[in-house]
Each structure stands twice: as C-alpha cells, then as structure tokens.
Image: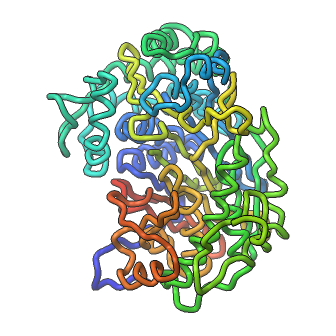
C-alpha cells in the first residue's frame, strides 16, 4: 500500500466497467460507450480513435494495431494481428540495385501499408455491438473542433520537430514549431477522412480518394507503394493463435510473431526458474537478474523474429521450458555475463511511440489494445489532403539478404507493439495490461508483471516503479533508480547510462472476481488515467 506522505496516485476501483488509457479524452470516450451499452471492444475502438487525433505523435490511422480479447464466459483469448505489409515491389534486389544498405526512419521506403483500420473493422465484425459510424464520433469531434495539447504530448511533439521539418510537414508545425501545452490543434482533413470511414467502412481508407492521396504522397517521396497495395491491405488484419506461458500459477498471453510478445514470455520463462529476490523489487539482485534474462531474450529476438507467413520462426524452441531453464542457469548473482551464447544456444563454452489501452465491461469482457505509428510521428510523412500521418514500421526490416527479417514483397516487419493478457488457473481473464515504449515493451511487460505478482505491488505501484532496460551493451536507467543500485550494477559488469526520457507508459485493469471489483492503473509517465463506474 502506498505511503500517503509521498506524491503519487492510488489505483482506481469500480464495479461495472473501467477503461485505462494514456489520454483523459480517450478514457472518457471509452466510458461513454460502456455506459451507452457498448462492450469492451466497442469502447476500445472509440478510445483509440480519439487517441489517433489527440495523441498524434504516438498513434494514428496511418499505423498498425494488435489486440487480445477475452470474451466473458468463454475462457479463451483471441489474438488479432493488424500489422500491415511492405509494398509488392519492395524486394531486396531493388534495394541492392539502388545501393541502399539501410532504411531511413523518415523515408517513404520505411512506410508499410497501415493495418489499423482493417483491424478495427475486423474486430468489430467479430466481437463488436456498435458500428464505426457511431464509435468514431468522439474522434471526429476532436479533429474538427480541436483539442488542447497535454504536457507529455507536447514534449513528444517538440522532440519530433526535426523529423517534421525534414519532410515538410508544416501542418504539424504551427507558427514554425511544436504547439505549446494548452494550445488548440485542429485536424479538419483527418476529421473528414474519419467521417468517410464511419460511413463507408474500411473501403474509404484503402480505396478511392484517401488511398490515392496516400500513394501519391509516398510515390512523390520515392516510395514503392501502389493503390493495389492499399486495396489488398483492406483485408490484411487476421485472427491468429495467441501464444502463452504459465507463470507462477497464472497464464500470460501474447500475440505471436511477427510481434515481439514472445520476448516477454522468454524473460518470464527464465525468471520462473529463479525465486524472487528477498531484497525487494528495486534491489540490485532483482534488477541484475532481470537485465540478464532480457539480454538473452532480446538476443534471440534480433536473430529469429520475423513474419511467420514468409519464414520459419522457431517459436517452439524459444518457449521450450528446457531451453529457458538452461538460459536461467547461466545467470550469476555476482556478475554480468561478459559474452552471451549465440542465438538459440545456451552453452557458454561454445562462444565468446505507441499507445496502449485496456477496457473491461460490466459483463467481464476484457480488451487489451495497442495502436502505433512506431517512432514519434512515424515517418513524419503526412498525406495532406486526407490528414493521415504515416507510420515508419518498415524501419523494423533488415536489408540483409538471408536474414529472417529481411524486407520482401508483402511481408510484415518485426513488430514492437504488444498487448498482454493474464488468465487465472480456471482460464478466466484476470488482467488486460500493456506497457508502451517501442523496443522496451517486453522488458516493460515483464517488469510490471513481476512487480505485481512476485513482489506484491498494487497495480498502480507496479506501473510507477522506476524502470531500466539493456540496449546495445548499455543499461538505460530512469532517474528513479537509486544511485547506490546503479553503482553496484556497474561493479557487477553492467554499463548503466541515464536516459533522457522515461521508459514507455503502461495501463492495466485487474479483475477481482471474488470481490466483484475492477482495479485499474495508468502510467504517470503519460497524460492519461484510469476511470471506472
């Protein structure tokens, strides 16, 4: 329980429904849908559509989407992959012929066909009770009437000015720079596009004027996209079999590759072989073990993760309990591993931006939902007539012939955005959750879950706790990590470095079925909140 002498926020408790998002307007939109009789999936679509307007650096209809949905009473988790594909002309031969050895995050070549609208329509067709015409109304209102810039949104916007300037995206640079906190921002063109989608469905985005505007914009900047690529993207969203891992009496669910949710499960699978540290969640021992488990899981991600529709991803090997136990056996409590084993091996002798939200309704349906442009403002390329900012998800591809994640026609790139879900021993959903932050997300998921289930922190405390992440030989630490802990990690062989911005942002809703209550939390690193009724 939190110490009320210190600043912070308490978990939110309710009984009939709850939403947790990274923007107040989004949370309110979700609650309005719930109170009007909509279910958790309806509310999630309304909420994320609002975020696509009022949190434009992080998400948009020009991005991708993943979802985990647990219908009440079914004891089953459904997974939806709403990630888009590379253009049909994007093959490695073309890149080699043009002597392009690396993708740029601001290039039209980094833009994949957006999958979000396809995903929203597919999800509503399966589980929704309301249509896009009704659910998009709050987002349309914000786009046409304007919305005030919140502090975190303003900070992210200011950090993306150079990208927007590079691509001449002056619409998002009013008066030559990022808007200030409290300034109003109107997106009339985006509002008109949302109106078309509400009336005509996904065809209004993937065919006709909107698709033509996007393709014309991308082609003018060197893209390989065609209107046929967009027409094919209308049905790109697919229901897929989720992957799972049992962890200390509960089951953690993730979407399968091409997303990196499997890396969350790999980290947890290693930690399941080690008792929680008796010294607590911010102890050197706990953080060191978590860093080491993450280093090995991310190593395998970079070697194997790709589109399973085009290459073989060794999911079974990566989640094999014996393999994860062997990896856990390499973790020493006295020192960091100077060299990791090769990907897929456990024998040391051989080798030297995004928005997440969750909703639970009165019937117990649970929705875990994530939608993203990837980096801040994605590619920074705006299709001006339609108001659509385009993601740079293709930046996740490799231009390395033979690599599983090498770019190819109609291929999905390795994806960072991952929704999470936890079920209990009976198979009932007990917690939709997620942590944003690009490559940080598996680390964030595993930190949050172990904060809550291993160390007993409540939902809000588990989200609030300071974070760190191993990346490129360093360990990026938030300012909240105690200095004495940082110094001890250094002596163990880690290379901690401060990070300018915080790691991600998270939301979660715990379903306490015995007491009939919902318990929600939302990350103070973002502008949002959890609310229930």
User: Going by the picture, which residue comes out furthest to the bottom?
Assistant: 278
Residue 119, image x and y in percent? 62, 33
Residue 319 falls in which quadrant of the image? bottom right
How far across and down, in percent of the image, does residue 4 sit? 32, 83
Measuring from the top left, give residue 476's x and y in whole percent. Answer: 43, 64
Query: Eyeballing the image, is 510 above or below 362?
Result: below
Q: Name the residue nearer the viewer: 229 or 341.
A: 341
Residue at 64% in and 27% down: 85
- The residue at the point 71 percent across, 45 percent down is 257
Q: Is residue 59 left or right of residue 434?
A: left
Q: Is residue 197 above or below residue 334?
A: above
Residue at horizontal 40 percent and vertical 24 percent from the top? 381
Q: How many marks?
A: 0
Quarter location, residue 154: top left
Way the structure is coloured: rainbow
The residue positioned 41% from the left and 27% from the top of the image is: 389
Can residue 399 be spotted in the picture? yes
Horizontal side, residue 530 vs residue 420: left or right = left
> Of residues 255 and 501, which is closer to you in this image?
501
Q: Nearer the viewer, residue 177 or 151?
A: 177
Residue 6 in picture, x, y percent from top left: 29, 81
91 shown above or below 128: above
Q: Is residue 61 visible?
A: no
For this orientation, the residue located farthest to the left is: 175
Position of the N terminus by quadrant: bottom left
């Amino acid at each position: 329980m939190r110490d009320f002498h210190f600043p912070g926020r308490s978990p939110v408790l309710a009984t009939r429904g709850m939403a947790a998002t990274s923007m107040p307007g989004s949370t309110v939109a979700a609650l309005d849908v719930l109170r009007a009789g909509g279910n958790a999936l309806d509310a999630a679509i309304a909420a994320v559509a609002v975020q696509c307007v009022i949190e434009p650096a992080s998400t948009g209809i020009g991005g991708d989407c993943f979802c985990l949905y647990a219908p009440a009473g079914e004891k089953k988790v459904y997974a939806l992959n709403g990630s888009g594909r590379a253009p049909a002309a994007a093959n490695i031969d073309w890149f080699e012929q043009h002597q392009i050895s690396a993708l740029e995050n601001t290039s039209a070549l980094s833009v994949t066909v957006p999958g979000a609208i396809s995903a929203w329509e597919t999800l509503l067709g399966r589980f929704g009770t309301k249509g896009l015409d009704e659910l998009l109304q709050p987002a349309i209102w914000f786009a046409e009437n304007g919305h005030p810039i919140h502090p975190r949104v303003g900070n992210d916007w200011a950090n993306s000015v150079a990208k927007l300037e590079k691509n001449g995206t002056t619409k998002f640079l009013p008066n030559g720079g990022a808007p200030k906190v409290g300034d109003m921002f109107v997106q009339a063109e985006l509002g008109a596009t949302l109106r078309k989608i509400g009336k005509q469905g996904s065809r209004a985005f993937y065919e006709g004027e909107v698709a033509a505007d996007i393709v014309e914009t991308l082609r003018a900047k060197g893209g390989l996209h065609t209107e046929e690529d967009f027409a094919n993207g209308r049905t790109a969203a697919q229901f897929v079999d989720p992957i799972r891992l049992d962890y200390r009496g509960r089951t953690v669910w993730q979407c399968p590759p091409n997303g990196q949710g499997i890396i969350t499960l790999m980290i947890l699978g290693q930690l399941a072989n080690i008792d929680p540290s008796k010294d607590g969640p911010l102890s050197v021992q706990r953080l060191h073990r978590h860093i080491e488990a993450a280093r090995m899981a991310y190593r395998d991600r970079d070697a194997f993760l790709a589109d399973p529709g085009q290459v073989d991803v060794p999911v079974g090997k990566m989640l094999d309990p014996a393999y994860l136990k062997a990896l856990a056996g390499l973790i020493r409590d006295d020192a960091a591993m100077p060299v990791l084993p090769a990907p897929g091996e456990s024998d040391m002798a051989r080798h030297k931006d995004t928005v997440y939200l969750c909703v639970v309704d009165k019937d117990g349906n649970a929705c875990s939902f994530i939608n993203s442009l990837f980096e801040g403002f994605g590619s920074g390329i705006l299709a001006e007539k339609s108001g659509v900012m385009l993601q740079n998800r293709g930046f996740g591809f490799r231009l390395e012939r033979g690599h599983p994640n090498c770019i190819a026609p109609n291929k999905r790139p390795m994806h960072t955005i991952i929704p999470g879900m936890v079920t209990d021993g009976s198979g009932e959903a007990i917690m939709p959750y997620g942590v944003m932050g690009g490559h940080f997300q598996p680390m964030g998921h595993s930190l949050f879950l172990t904060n809550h289930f291993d160390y007993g922190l409540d939902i809000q405390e588990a989200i609030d706790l300071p974070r760190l992440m191993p990346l490129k030989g360093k360990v990026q630490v938030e300012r909240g990590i105690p200095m004495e802990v940082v110094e001890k990690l250094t002596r163990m062989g880690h290379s901690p470095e401060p990070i300018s911005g915080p790691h991600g942002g998270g939301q979660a809703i715990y379903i306490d079925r015995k007491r009939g209550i919902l318990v929600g939390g939302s990350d103070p690193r973002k502008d949002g909140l959890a609310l229930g009724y």
